Amino acid sequence: MDARMKALALLAAAVTLTGTGCKKGSSGTAGQDVGMASTREVSIGSVQLGRSLSGDKRVSGSTDKFSPRDTIYASVETSGAAPNTTINARWTYEGQQVVKEDSRSISPTGSDVTEFHISKPSGWPKGKYQFTATVGGSTQSKDFEVK
Amino acid sequence: MPNNNSPKADFSDVQSGSSSTAPQASPAGGRSYTVKKGDSLSKIAKREYGDAQQWHRIYEANRDSISNPDLIQPGQVLQLPSA
């Protein structure tokens, strides 16, 4: 009976030790999240342009051709986590003229999508445009055209 | 060969917005500011902090979006560090 009690006590101690391994700052296996808040450098995975959005903030029907009356959406996929990071969005026309600059401060937790959109009631001038998203040291651009 | 004499397109009526699946970060004492016509970093610093020399704080907080501190654009959104 004593031996059985000792075995149970050892088992309980082992469970207690392994069950407290999830501390802030500890790392998961091969960089994977293990179900707790962590901080990883936030970077841009991809940028897509389109005329409308789906519920998950991604554009539905990616395109790089727009009409003068279109609202233009850009969805920026990011990976990484941080308590406070800023995504900067810059829209330019014909290589140098700034159309609009925006930024959004977010607390990403892993894989997120942030959308930026612009519209112009009087209609977009025809020509070549570019959308650039920057977060930290990560930048991605996408060219598009208004015809 | 681009024609440098051609007038710039007028984007003054452009409307914009954003949203995200990520929660909005709580401001850490700072706030955002939209640049108005006639603004400069030193004018904003004078108005916000009472000292035009503080312009470099705004510049440092916005290095991602300001390539030339003498050239900011109306409509540009800047993050203003807390005073």
Image (cartoon, rainbow, N blue to C red):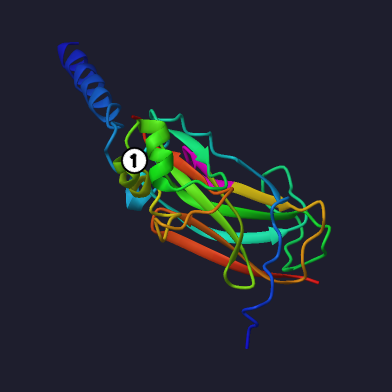
Q: Please check the rendered image and state whether residue A26 is part of the magenta-colored stretch, yes or no.
A: no
Q: Is residue B62 above or below residue A14?
A: below
Mark 1 chain: B
Say whether residue A106 is magenta: yes
Point out residue A137 in the picture as x, y percentages from the top left corner.
38, 58
In the image, residue B15 above or below residue B4 = above
At 27% from the left edge and 39% from the top edge, which residue is drawn? A26
Q: Position of residue A138 (x, y in %)?
A: 43, 59
Q: Looking at the picture, which amino acid does disc 1 mark? A: Ala
Where is residue A130? Give x, y as percent.
62, 67
- Residue sitting nearer the eye, B81 or A18: B81
The residue closer to the viewer here, A14 or A44, is: A44
Let me know if residue A26 appears in the view: yes
Q: Which residue is mark 1?
A: B52
For the point 77% across and 66% down, the residue is A125
Q: Quadrant of residue A15?
A: top left
Residue toward you, A20 or A16: A20
Q: In the figure, is residue A14 to the left or right of A52?
A: left
- Determine the residue located farthest toward the bottom in the rendered image: B1
Helix, strand or loop for the magenta stretch, by majority: strand
Q: Is residue B33 left or right of residue A13?
A: right
* Rendered position, A138 above or below B81: below
Give how far across and how far down residue A21 sits, in percent.
27, 32
Quarter of the figure with the C terminus of chain A: bottom right
- Which residues make up the magenta segment? A104-113
Residue in the image at 43% along x and 40% along y = B44
Q: Specify the quadrant of the image occupied by residue A8.
A: top left
Left or right: A42 with respect to A124?
left
Which quadrant, please, contains the N terminus of chain A? Answer: top left
Q: Secondary structure at mark 1?
A: helix
Mark 1 neighbour density, 10 Å: few (under 14) some (14–19) many (20 or more): some
Visible residue check, residue A36: no
